[in-house]
Amino acid sequence: MKKGSSEKDKSTQLSDAIITFEQILEAIPTDRLALETLSDAYEQLGEKAKALEYYTRLASVILEDGDKKAAPELSKKLRELGGNDAEIQQVIDFLDHLVAPDEEEMKQQAASKPSARKKGEPIRRRGTDITAELALAWNLVQAGELTQDEYSSVVNDLTESSSRNNNVPVSVLHVLRDRTFKNYERVLTFISTSSGIPIVPLAGFELQKDANSLLPMDFAIHRGAIVFEMMGKEPLIAILNPYDTELKKDIEELMGRKCHYYLVAAEDYDRYLDALRKASAAPETPPA
Protein backbone atom coordinates (compact mmCIF):
# COMPACT_ATOMS: atom_id res chain seq x y z
CA MET A 1 0.00 0.00 0.00
CA LYS A 2 1.28 3.45 -0.89
CA LYS A 3 2.08 5.90 1.87
CA GLY A 4 -0.44 8.42 0.52
CA SER A 5 -3.18 5.80 0.53
CA SER A 6 -2.33 4.81 4.11
CA GLU A 7 -2.51 8.42 5.27
CA LYS A 8 -5.85 8.82 3.50
CA ASP A 9 -7.22 5.73 5.26
CA LYS A 10 -6.06 7.05 8.60
CA SER A 11 -7.67 10.41 7.91
CA THR A 12 -10.92 8.67 6.99
CA GLN A 13 -10.84 6.60 10.17
CA LEU A 14 -10.26 9.72 12.27
CA SER A 15 -13.10 11.54 10.51
CA ASP A 16 -15.43 8.59 11.12
CA ALA A 17 -14.40 8.54 14.79
CA ILE A 18 -15.07 12.26 15.08
CA ILE A 19 -18.60 11.87 13.67
CA THR A 20 -19.34 8.97 16.02
CA PHE A 21 -18.05 10.57 19.19
CA GLU A 22 -19.54 13.99 18.47
CA GLN A 23 -22.91 12.23 18.30
CA ILE A 24 -22.16 10.66 21.68
CA LEU A 25 -21.36 14.09 23.13
CA GLU A 26 -24.68 15.45 21.88
CA ALA A 27 -26.38 12.89 24.12
CA ILE A 28 -23.80 12.86 26.95
CA PRO A 29 -21.83 16.17 26.96
CA THR A 30 -19.52 15.04 29.77
CA ASP A 31 -18.57 11.62 28.37
CA ARG A 32 -14.83 11.44 29.03
CA LEU A 33 -14.02 8.75 26.47
CA ALA A 34 -15.67 10.82 23.75
CA LEU A 35 -13.85 13.98 24.81
CA GLU A 36 -10.51 12.17 24.97
CA THR A 37 -11.05 10.54 21.57
CA LEU A 38 -12.09 13.78 19.87
CA SER A 39 -9.17 15.70 21.40
CA ASP A 40 -6.70 13.12 20.14
CA ALA A 41 -8.35 12.81 16.73
CA TYR A 42 -8.28 16.52 16.03
CA GLU A 43 -4.69 16.72 17.27
CA GLN A 44 -3.66 13.96 14.85
CA LEU A 45 -5.42 15.79 12.03
CA GLY A 46 -3.41 18.90 12.88
CA GLU A 47 -6.50 20.91 13.88
CA LYS A 48 -4.98 22.48 16.99
CA ALA A 49 -7.88 24.84 17.79
CA LYS A 50 -10.45 22.02 17.76
CA ALA A 51 -8.14 19.76 19.78
CA LEU A 52 -7.74 22.49 22.41
CA GLU A 53 -11.50 23.01 22.50
CA TYR A 54 -12.09 19.38 23.42
CA TYR A 55 -9.11 19.18 25.77
CA THR A 56 -10.54 22.20 27.60
CA ARG A 57 -13.94 20.54 27.85
CA LEU A 58 -12.22 17.42 29.15
CA ALA A 59 -10.46 19.58 31.75
CA SER A 60 -13.84 20.83 32.97
CA VAL A 61 -15.03 17.26 33.52
CA ILE A 62 -11.81 16.26 35.28
CA LEU A 63 -11.99 19.29 37.54
CA GLU A 64 -15.63 18.71 38.42
CA ASP A 65 -14.84 15.04 39.17
CA GLY A 66 -11.80 16.08 41.23
CA ASP A 67 -9.75 13.49 39.33
CA LYS A 68 -6.24 14.22 40.62
CA LYS A 69 -4.71 11.30 38.73
CA ALA A 70 -5.84 12.51 35.30
CA ALA A 71 -5.03 16.20 35.90
CA PRO A 72 -1.19 16.13 35.48
CA GLU A 73 -1.22 14.45 32.07
CA LEU A 74 -3.89 16.80 30.73
CA SER A 75 -2.06 19.81 32.17
CA LYS A 76 1.07 18.71 30.28
CA LYS A 77 -0.90 18.27 27.05
CA LEU A 78 -2.47 21.73 27.34
CA ARG A 79 0.97 23.25 27.91
CA GLU A 80 2.24 21.61 24.73
CA LEU A 81 -0.66 22.80 22.58
CA GLY A 82 -1.66 26.15 24.01
CA GLY A 83 0.46 27.19 26.95
CA ASN A 84 0.84 30.72 25.58
CA ASP A 85 -2.91 31.35 25.49
CA ALA A 86 -4.13 33.21 28.61
CA GLU A 87 -7.39 31.26 28.94
CA ILE A 88 -5.65 27.91 28.43
CA GLN A 89 -3.07 28.92 31.04
CA GLN A 90 -5.86 29.50 33.56
CA VAL A 91 -7.15 25.99 32.92
CA ILE A 92 -3.60 24.67 33.38
CA ASP A 93 -3.27 26.59 36.66
CA PHE A 94 -6.53 25.14 37.87
CA LEU A 95 -5.46 21.58 37.05
CA ASP A 96 -2.17 22.20 38.86
CA HIS A 97 -4.04 23.51 41.92
CA LEU A 98 -6.10 20.33 41.92
CA VAL A 99 -2.96 18.21 42.23
CA ALA A 100 -0.95 20.51 44.52
CA PRO A 101 -2.54 19.41 47.85
CA ASP A 102 -1.56 15.80 47.22
CA GLU A 103 2.03 16.80 46.52
CA GLU A 104 2.16 18.76 49.76
CA GLU A 105 0.64 15.88 51.66
CA MET A 106 3.28 13.51 50.28
CA LYS A 107 6.03 15.82 51.54
CA GLN A 108 4.45 15.96 54.98
CA GLN A 109 4.05 12.20 55.10
CA ALA A 110 7.68 11.73 54.11
CA ALA A 111 8.73 13.93 57.03
CA SER A 112 6.42 12.35 59.56
CA LYS A 113 3.95 9.54 59.12
CA PRO A 114 0.62 10.65 60.66
CA SER A 115 -1.10 8.47 63.21
CA ALA A 116 -4.52 7.03 62.51
CA ARG A 117 -7.49 9.21 63.43
CA LYS A 118 -9.19 8.01 66.59
CA LYS A 119 -12.94 7.51 66.66
CA GLY A 120 -14.72 10.76 67.44
CA GLU A 121 -11.64 12.87 66.66
CA PRO A 122 -12.34 15.83 64.35
CA ILE A 123 -11.66 15.20 60.68
CA ARG A 124 -9.47 18.15 59.79
CA ARG A 125 -9.15 19.69 56.37
CA ARG A 126 -5.58 20.20 55.18
CA GLY A 127 -4.71 23.89 55.19
CA THR A 128 -3.71 23.78 51.53
CA ASP A 129 -6.65 21.67 50.37
CA ILE A 130 -8.94 24.15 48.64
CA THR A 131 -9.87 21.74 45.86
CA ALA A 132 -13.63 21.97 46.45
CA GLU A 133 -13.52 25.78 46.48
CA LEU A 134 -11.46 25.88 43.30
CA ALA A 135 -13.97 23.55 41.66
CA LEU A 136 -16.81 25.85 42.72
CA ALA A 137 -14.99 28.86 41.26
CA TRP A 138 -14.47 26.97 38.01
CA ASN A 139 -18.17 26.03 37.86
CA LEU A 140 -19.06 29.72 38.24
CA VAL A 141 -16.80 30.59 35.31
CA GLN A 142 -18.34 27.88 33.16
CA ALA A 143 -21.83 29.13 34.05
CA GLY A 144 -20.90 32.72 33.17
CA GLU A 145 -21.26 33.93 36.74
CA LEU A 146 -17.57 34.93 36.94
CA THR A 147 -15.36 36.42 34.24
CA GLN A 148 -11.89 35.05 33.61
CA ASP A 149 -10.35 38.04 35.41
CA GLU A 150 -12.68 37.62 38.39
CA TYR A 151 -11.89 33.91 38.47
CA SER A 152 -8.15 34.62 38.54
CA SER A 153 -8.61 37.01 41.47
CA VAL A 154 -10.74 34.51 43.37
CA VAL A 155 -8.18 31.71 42.86
CA ASN A 156 -5.39 34.02 44.00
CA ASP A 157 -7.31 35.00 47.16
CA LEU A 158 -8.22 31.39 47.94
CA THR A 159 -4.60 30.29 47.54
CA GLU A 160 -3.29 33.09 49.76
CA SER A 161 -5.96 32.53 52.41
CA SER A 162 -5.32 28.78 52.52
CA SER A 163 -1.73 29.40 53.61
CA ARG A 164 -2.76 31.49 56.62
CA ASN A 165 -4.07 30.48 60.02
CA ASN A 166 -7.69 31.48 59.48
CA ASN A 167 -10.44 31.84 62.05
CA VAL A 168 -13.13 31.49 59.38
CA PRO A 169 -13.46 29.02 56.49
CA VAL A 170 -11.60 29.61 53.24
CA SER A 171 -14.46 29.79 50.76
CA VAL A 172 -15.45 31.32 47.44
CA LEU A 173 -18.36 33.05 49.15
CA HIS A 174 -16.02 34.68 51.66
CA VAL A 175 -13.72 35.88 48.88
CA LEU A 176 -16.63 37.35 46.90
CA ARG A 177 -18.03 38.97 50.03
CA ASP A 178 -14.66 40.47 50.96
CA ARG A 179 -14.28 41.82 47.42
CA THR A 180 -17.81 43.33 47.60
CA PHE A 181 -18.59 41.45 44.40
CA LYS A 182 -21.53 43.23 42.75
CA ASN A 183 -23.28 39.99 41.73
CA TYR A 184 -22.77 38.26 45.06
CA GLU A 185 -26.48 37.67 45.70
CA ARG A 186 -26.96 36.39 42.16
CA VAL A 187 -24.06 33.94 42.61
CA LEU A 188 -25.55 32.76 45.90
CA THR A 189 -28.89 32.16 44.19
CA PHE A 190 -27.19 30.36 41.30
CA ILE A 191 -25.32 28.02 43.66
CA SER A 192 -28.54 27.24 45.50
CA THR A 193 -30.51 26.60 42.32
CA SER A 194 -27.83 24.53 40.56
CA SER A 195 -27.13 22.38 43.63
CA GLY A 196 -30.76 22.02 44.68
CA ILE A 197 -29.89 23.15 48.22
CA PRO A 198 -32.00 25.99 49.68
CA ILE A 199 -30.52 29.08 51.31
CA VAL A 200 -31.04 29.37 55.06
CA PRO A 201 -31.03 32.72 56.92
CA LEU A 202 -29.12 31.73 60.06
CA ALA A 203 -30.00 35.05 61.66
CA GLY A 204 -33.44 33.59 62.28
CA PHE A 205 -32.07 30.75 64.44
CA GLU A 206 -30.86 30.99 68.00
CA LEU A 207 -27.91 28.98 69.26
CA GLN A 208 -28.83 25.46 70.32
CA LYS A 209 -26.13 23.89 72.45
CA ASP A 210 -27.17 20.29 71.85
CA ALA A 211 -27.37 20.73 68.07
CA ASN A 212 -24.32 22.99 67.76
CA SER A 213 -22.12 20.53 69.63
CA LEU A 214 -22.84 17.63 67.25
CA LEU A 215 -19.93 18.77 65.05
CA PRO A 216 -16.53 19.79 66.48
CA MET A 217 -15.76 23.51 66.45
CA ASP A 218 -13.06 22.63 63.91
CA PHE A 219 -15.79 22.06 61.33
CA ALA A 220 -17.36 25.44 61.98
CA ILE A 221 -14.04 27.32 61.84
CA HIS A 222 -12.19 25.47 59.08
CA ARG A 223 -14.61 23.26 57.17
CA GLY A 224 -17.59 25.58 56.70
CA ALA A 225 -20.31 23.49 58.38
CA ILE A 226 -22.53 24.20 61.42
CA VAL A 227 -25.42 22.18 62.83
CA PHE A 228 -28.03 24.86 63.55
CA GLU A 229 -31.22 22.87 64.15
CA MET A 230 -32.61 19.36 64.52
CA MET A 231 -35.51 17.76 62.69
CA GLY A 232 -36.27 14.95 65.05
CA LYS A 233 -32.95 13.10 65.24
CA GLU A 234 -31.73 14.40 61.89
CA PRO A 235 -29.41 17.46 61.95
CA LEU A 236 -29.90 20.50 59.73
CA ILE A 237 -26.48 21.72 58.62
CA ALA A 238 -25.52 25.11 57.19
CA ILE A 239 -22.68 24.88 54.64
CA LEU A 240 -20.81 27.28 52.35
CA ASN A 241 -20.15 24.91 49.46
CA PRO A 242 -22.85 22.39 48.48
CA TYR A 243 -20.46 20.73 46.01
CA ASP A 244 -17.91 19.73 48.67
CA THR A 245 -18.56 15.99 48.65
CA GLU A 246 -15.63 15.25 50.96
CA LEU A 247 -17.11 17.55 53.60
CA LYS A 248 -20.47 15.80 53.46
CA LYS A 249 -18.76 12.41 53.60
CA ASP A 250 -16.80 13.43 56.70
CA ILE A 251 -19.90 14.87 58.38
CA GLU A 252 -21.96 11.75 57.79
CA GLU A 253 -19.08 9.57 58.99
CA LEU A 254 -19.09 11.47 62.28
CA MET A 255 -22.86 11.72 62.57
CA GLY A 256 -23.83 8.22 61.60
CA ARG A 257 -27.26 9.50 60.63
CA LYS A 258 -29.14 11.24 57.84
CA CYS A 259 -28.25 14.93 57.45
CA HIS A 260 -29.99 17.81 55.68
CA TYR A 261 -27.88 20.56 54.11
CA TYR A 262 -28.60 24.25 53.57
CA LEU A 263 -26.57 26.94 51.82
CA VAL A 264 -25.63 29.99 53.88
CA ALA A 265 -24.23 33.40 52.94
CA ALA A 266 -20.70 34.15 54.18
CA GLU A 267 -21.69 37.12 56.35
CA ASP A 268 -24.58 35.18 57.88
CA TYR A 269 -22.26 32.26 58.59
CA ASP A 270 -19.66 34.50 60.24
CA ARG A 271 -22.23 36.12 62.54
CA TYR A 272 -23.47 32.74 63.71
CA LEU A 273 -19.90 31.44 64.11
CA ASP A 274 -18.96 34.49 66.18
CA ALA A 275 -21.94 33.91 68.48
CA LEU A 276 -21.01 30.23 68.71
CA ARG A 277 -17.44 31.11 69.70
CA LYS A 278 -18.61 33.49 72.41
CA ALA A 279 -21.03 30.94 73.79
CA SER A 280 -18.31 28.27 73.83
CA ALA A 281 -15.89 30.57 75.65
CA ALA A 282 -18.41 31.77 78.26
CA PRO A 283 -18.35 29.87 81.59
CA GLU A 284 -21.40 27.76 82.25
CA THR A 285 -23.81 29.03 84.90
CA PRO A 286 -24.13 26.42 87.69
CA PRO A 287 -27.68 25.21 88.39
CA ALA A 288 -29.46 26.95 91.28
Image (tube, helix red, strand yellow):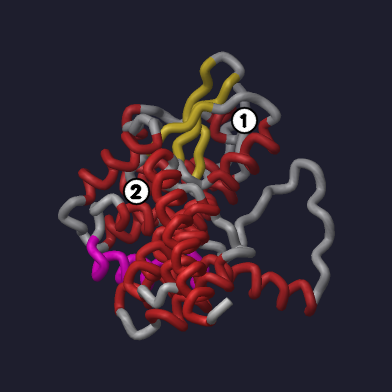
Left or right: where does residue 219 sit relative to residue 271?
right
Are there few (<14), some (14-19), or many (20+) residues within 10 Å of tag 2?
Answer: many
Residue 15 forms part of the magenta stretch:
no
Q: Are marks 2 and 1 in contact (CB under 8 Å)?
A: no
Q: Residue at x 30, y 65 (%)?
A: 151
Q: Position of residue 100 (x, y in %)?
A: 57, 72
Q: Position of residue 130 (x, y in %)?
A: 50, 61
Badge 2 or badge 1: first in the primary sequence? 2
Q: Main secondary structure of the magenta part?
A: helix
Q: Residue at x 56, y 27 (%)?
A: 259
**Label 2 sits on what residue type?**
Ala
Instruction: Specify start and end residues of the magenta stretch as a single range.
Output: 147-168
Residue 149 forms part of the magenta stretch:
yes
Q: Position of residue 182 (x, y in %)?
A: 16, 55
Residue at the left extreme of this rendering? 182
Q: How many tags in the picture?
A: 2
- The one of 130 and 68 positioned closer to us in this rendering: 68
Q: Gap between marks 2 and 1, in whole Å?
A: 35 Å
Left or right: where does residue 269 sit relative to residue 73?
left
Which residue in the protein does label 1 denote?
286
Of helix, strand and loop, which one carries label 1?
loop
Indicate which disc residue 59 carries: none
Q: Position of residue 111 (x, y in %)?
A: 78, 79
Vertical side of 126 occupied by 184: above or below: above
**Label 1 sits on what residue type?**
Pro
Which residue in the protein does label 2 denote?
266
Q: Quadrant of the C terminus?
A: top right
